[in-house]
Amino acid sequence: MQCSRLTQAALGKMIIGARILESDSFGAKVYLLQDGNILKLFRRKRLFSSALMRPYSKRFIDNALQLQKLGIPTLHVLSFHKLDLPGTTAVLYSPLPGETLRQRSIQPGFSWKDALPSLIELIRSLHQSGIYFRSLHLGNIVATPEGELGLIDVADMRFLRAPLSKRLARRNLQHFARYIGRERLTSEFPLAALEKALLPA
């Protein structure tokens, strides 16, 4: 996808009336625009890094396209931009419709017993396809209106040529387990059942 320049003035017009979904010490980084699309800013935080050769915004776009090729629901990239601020790029995309599993899990009547099989099947499919998604957690997995599970925030992802080794699969689930701990979900999420299904002895 070609990268076009987005001036500060054009950016200002684009985000009029937008809702800030995420920010960091540098300022707003994810905007929900009035038309329902999302603008995500990517800032290179170090002068010399791997992002200099392949920016995270480019990884984000490439990974979304690769997931689409594999039939895994994900966001749809609309355009790619270079901003006036050095080291800053932006991706405009339409979000994946649905709710994250984190959002679903706090709704009345939700049961992990019912939801776990489809989550296990998604993660198993990723691992068998050689996809190492370091940011795999309940806030990045979306339940679509069609009843499928898909992925968002896909920059931190690797595509390997073979299924994940047991070591990598275990490491991936360790990232997931840390998220469960941070969100204080240990008492309600069936982590042992998930690990038993995905990491057979």
Image: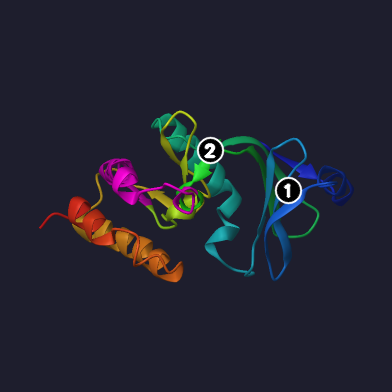
- Left or right, residue 182 beside residue 9: left
Tell me where residue 94 appears, x and y as whole percent.
63, 36
Element carrying mark 1 = strand
Q: Is residue 7 magenta?
A: no
* Amino acid marked by disc 1: Lys
* Neighbourhood count class around disc 1 (C-alpha, 10 Å): few under 14, some 14–19, many 20 upward: some
Q: Quadrant of the C terminus?
A: bottom left
Left or right: 104 with respect to 4?
left
Which residue matches tag 1? 82
Above or below — where is 99 with respect to 185?
above
User: Left or right of 15: which side holds 114?
Assistant: left
Q: Which color scheme does this rendered protein use? A: rainbow
Residue that appears at 45% across and 28% down: 146
Query: As drawn, which residue projects farthest toward the front?
Result: 109
- Where does the image place residue 15, in percent across and percent down from the top left? 81, 47
Q: Main secondary structure of the magenta part?
A: helix
Q: Residue at x 75, y 60 (%)?
A: 86
Circle 2 residue: 98
Q: Tell me if I can see residue 134 in this picture.
A: yes
Give the magenta-colored segment's residue range. Answer: 104-132
Is residue 1 in view from this perspective?
no
The residue lying at 49 percent from left, 31 percent from top is: 145
Front label number (1 vs 2) = 2
Say which amino acid is labelled 2.
Gly
